[in-house]
Amino acid sequence: MAIFSKRNKLKKDYDARFIRLLEETRSDWHTAQAVESHLDDYNLDAIAKRKTLESIHFYLYKEAKRRQVVYKPN
C-alpha cells in the first residue's frame, strides 16, 4: 500500500513542476509575441525566437495531454 501512495505523491509533485514549466513557456511565448508586434521592421531574430518558444509550448502542451495532466491556462 505504501508504494501506491508514494507513486501518487511523486506524480503530483512532477505534475506541479510540469504545469509550472508550461506556464513559464506560455508567458515567454506571449512576451515574444508582444515584442515582435512592437517592432517596426521585419526582424528575423524576433520571429525565430517567437516560433521557437511557440513550438516548445505546444510540444509541452501535447506532452501534458499524453500524461493526462490537467492544465487550464488563465
Image (cartoon, helix red, strand yellow):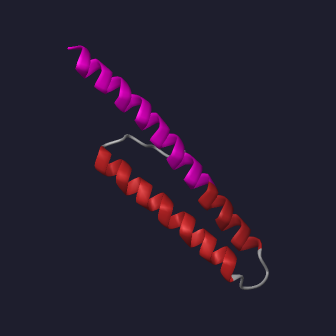
What x and y, as percent, mark residue 62? 36, 56
Quarter of the image where one finds residue 15: top left
Q: Which span is picked out in magenta? A: 1-27
Q: Nearer the viewer, residue 30 or 28?
A: 28
Left or right, 10 with respect to 20, comes to left
Please say if 12 is above or below 43. Answer: above
Q: Nearer the viewer, residue 2 or 66?
A: 2
Left or right, 47 with respect to 38, comes to left
Please say if 62 is above or below 16. Answer: below
Please say if 14 is above or below 26. Answer: above
Name the residue furthest bottom: 42
For the N terminus, give its image quadrant.
Answer: top left
Q: Is 51 part of what is drawn in magenta?
A: no
Magenta: main secondary structure equals: helix
For the C terminus, give its image quadrant.
Answer: top right
Q: Residue at coordinates 48% horizontally, 66% vertically from top-left? A: 55
